[in-house]
Structures are given as C-alpha cells and as structure tokens.
Image (tube, rainbow, N blue to C red):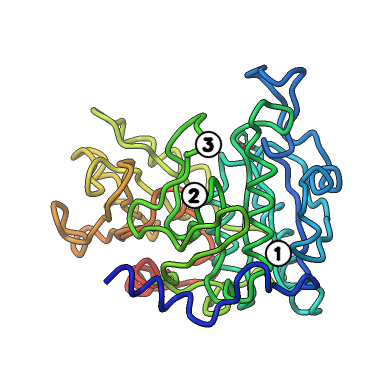
C-alpha cells in the first residue's frame, strides 16, 4: 500500500538529471550552526551565524548546476535569538519574491534550535504554492564531516523541483524532507535530530534525488487565512511547562505581564495539577485563551478526555507541540475570535 502511494506521488516527476537548470532558487540566510565557525575541525564549541550566505553557497560543489541560485542575507543569528520581527520580515520577503515572480523556489537557512517554530510560522503566512524549504546543520561549516553543505545541496534540489509545489513549508535535513506542521527537534547534538513523529515524512532526498511520500494533511501557505501584510507585532502568548506540584500563580504572573493566551505544556494528554486547572479556568472566564498542549515528545492532545474542556473553557492543541501551538494562537489572536473558532483552527492547521 505504502509502496503504491510512493509510486503515485512520483508519477510524472522528472529524474534529477532532467531538471531545468534555470529554475531560480533564492537562498535567504538567517544564521545558525550552518553558518557557524570554530577554531578547528574538532572543536565542540563554536559561534553560530559567522559565515555569509555567498561564502556558504560557494562552498557547496555542484550547487549552481542544480538551479540558478541567488543568496540574500536576512539576518545572521543563532536561532535561539530568532525573533518575531525577523520571522515577519522573512515571510514578507518570501511573499514579495514570489509575487514579483523573482524565484521559483526559496531556501531558508536557519539554526536548528527554533527551526520548527519559524517553519510553522512561514507555513501559516507564506502566500504561494511554490516551495519554501528550510535547512540548517548540526555541525558548523568548519567541522569534520560538516552536515551543512549536503543539507544545503539537498534543500536547493527540493526547492528547484516543480513536484515540490503545494507541499507547504518543508525542512530538509539529513536526507529527510519534513513538513513544517510535523517536525520537531529531538536530539541536542546528533545530525539525525529532526523527526516527524505524529504524521511522518513528506519524503526523502539523496544527493539531490527527491522522492515524495505524501502531501501535508493540514491547511498551509496558499490555503491559510493568516497574513503578515502590515503586521508589525503579535499579541503575547506564554508557554508554561507543567511539572509536579506546579505553582499555579505562574499563570497570574503571565496575565499580569500582558499575556492574552497561555499554552500549557502539559503532562501526557495535556494534563496539569488541580491548582493550575482552577487558576487557568478562572483566567479563561476572563477571556484569556488557555490551550492545552503536551511536553511529551509525540501524540495528540484531545478535548474532554481527563479534563472537561467544555466546562473549563480550554482549547486542546491537537497535533501541535507547545511552541507551534503558541505561534498559531499568536497569529489567531491578531483578531477577536470565539472559543469554538479557536478550537477549529487547531484542527485545521
Ligand atoms: N543554537 C544554534 C542555532 O539554533 C545551534 C543549533 C543549530 O543551528 O544547529 O542556531
């Protein structure tokens, strides 16, 4: 069954050798370990965001034979310093390039720490059917067996592939193609850090040879109702991590500091202790949006299982981990919405 599906997905796809070398791929760089440098090839410590995009592209053999590649530096930060200001600028620039028909596909280089957050943000705000492919590296450019050059080569291969259209924002790392909705970072240092545990991979890419398994199931990019047009800031939404004997007043502190929504990175299926439930329900009654997600690595958070969400006024994050649930909620709270509508968004995106 799976095999048949793979064959169907690849139907009509040209082999890599037949790809039009003139397809235009813009590489927008934001920094990260892929642009990182250390004193020596075996040094564990390094500084993210040291190399410029043109030097990175020039260091990848054969990349200019894949596509007409053009680099542009958007930022140069370790992705722990990725901000919504940079994400908004990035989404606006991608929309601008596609609207002007200045690129057939776009690659975004990015640190892996917050890659899934920016990928999800772009998946909700890019307005195009054309491919946006993010990539990064776990090892700096100067390391022995650096993974960045091949990741960049593979990312450009996917971005230059017409069959990559309408698959939303993807992340290419370590020969895998992940969907923005599904991927998550699972290892602090290994090159096999990203997994898509809930939904599986979009496909694979092996030295530029691309194979697809599926399209994303949820709405994204050109189907999305969210927009960065004229957007300069987003409402504050905080994430609170559930733990044994969690102090419930953290919720009050967040609200006092201006949070309009709170995502609970709950235990298991989005659980929290009784004191936190009481405080969260009190805040929900005052109009603060409470979303239950989970700090567990995989699985969904469903409504009305151990908690009566209908009575408490809570939202279930469904497939989104806390960081991605927060981003969806921030974009959603740009305008006023009912709880029913907010819950529906978590089933849709
Ligand atoms: N902190 C770095 C970053 O996210 C390291 C992770 C990486 O890029 O691999 O930029």
Q: Relative to the observer, which residue lies in front, 182 or 231? A: 182
Q: Residue at x 55, y 63 (%)?
A: 210
Whether residue 303 is situated above or below residue 184 in the rendered picture: below
Mark pair 2, 1: CA separation: 34 Å
How many numbered discs, if any? Answer: 3
Q: What element carries label 3?
A: loop
Camera-nearest residue between 75 and 236 = 75
Q: Which residue carries the number 2 mark?
A: 259
- Label 1: few (<14), some (14–19) or many (≥20) C-alpha neighbours in 10 Å: many
Quadrant location of residue 31? top right
Q: How crowded is mark 2: few (under 14 residues within 10 Å), some or many (20 or more)?
A: some
Which quadrant of the render holds ligand 1? Answer: top right
Q: Nearer the viewer, mark 3 or mark 2?
A: 3
Give the residue number, with chain letter if any, for mark 3.
191
Q: Separation of disc 1 and disc 3 at Cα? A: 23 Å
Q: Earlier in the sequence, mark 1 or mark 3?
A: 1
**In the visual, does 90 lie left or right of 174?**
right
């Amino acid at each position: 069954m799976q095999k048949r599906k793979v064959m169907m997905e690849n139907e009509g796809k040209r082999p890599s050798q037949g790809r039009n070398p003139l397809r235009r791929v813009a590489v927008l760089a934001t920094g990260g370990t892929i642009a990182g440098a250390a004193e020596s090839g075996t040094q564990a410590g390094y500084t993210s965001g040291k190399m410029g995009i043109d030097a990175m592209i020039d260091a990848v053999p054969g990349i200019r034979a894949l596509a007409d590649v053009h680099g542009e530096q958007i930022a140069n930060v370790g992705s722990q310093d990725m901000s919504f200001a940079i994400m908004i600028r990035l989404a606006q620039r991608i929309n601008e390039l596609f609207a002007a028909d200045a690129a057939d596909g776009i690659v975004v280089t990015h640190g892996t720490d917050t890659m899934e957050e920016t990928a999800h943000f772009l998946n909700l705000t890019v307005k195009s059917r054309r491919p946006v492919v993010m990539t990064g590296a776990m090892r700096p450019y100067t390391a022995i067996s650096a993974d960045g050059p091949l990741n960049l080569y593979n990312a450009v291969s996917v971005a230059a592939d017409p069959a990559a259209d309408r698959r939303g924002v993807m992340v290419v790392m370590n020969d895998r193609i992940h969907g923005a909705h599904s991927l998550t970072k699972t290892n602090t240092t290994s090159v096999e850090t990203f997994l898509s545990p809930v939904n599986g991979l979009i496909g694979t890419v092996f030295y530029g040879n691309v194979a697809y398994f599926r399209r994303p199931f949820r709405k994204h990019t050109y189907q999305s109702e969210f927009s960065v047009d004229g957007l300069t800031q987003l409402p504050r939404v905080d994430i609170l991590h559930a733990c044994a004997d969690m102090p419930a007043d953290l919720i009050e502190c967040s609200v006092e500091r201006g949070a309009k929504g709170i995502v609970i990175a709950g235990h298991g299926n989005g659980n929290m202790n009784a004191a936190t439930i009481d405080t969260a329900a009190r805040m929900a009654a005052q109009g603060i949006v409470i979303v239950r997600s989970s700090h567990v690595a995989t699985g969904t958070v469903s409504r009305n299982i151990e908690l009566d969400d209908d009575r408490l006024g809570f939202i279930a994050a469904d497939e989104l981990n806390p960081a991605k649930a927060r981003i969806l909620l921030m974009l959603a709270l740009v305008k006023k919405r009912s709880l029913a509508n907010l819950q529906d968004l978590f089933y849709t995106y």
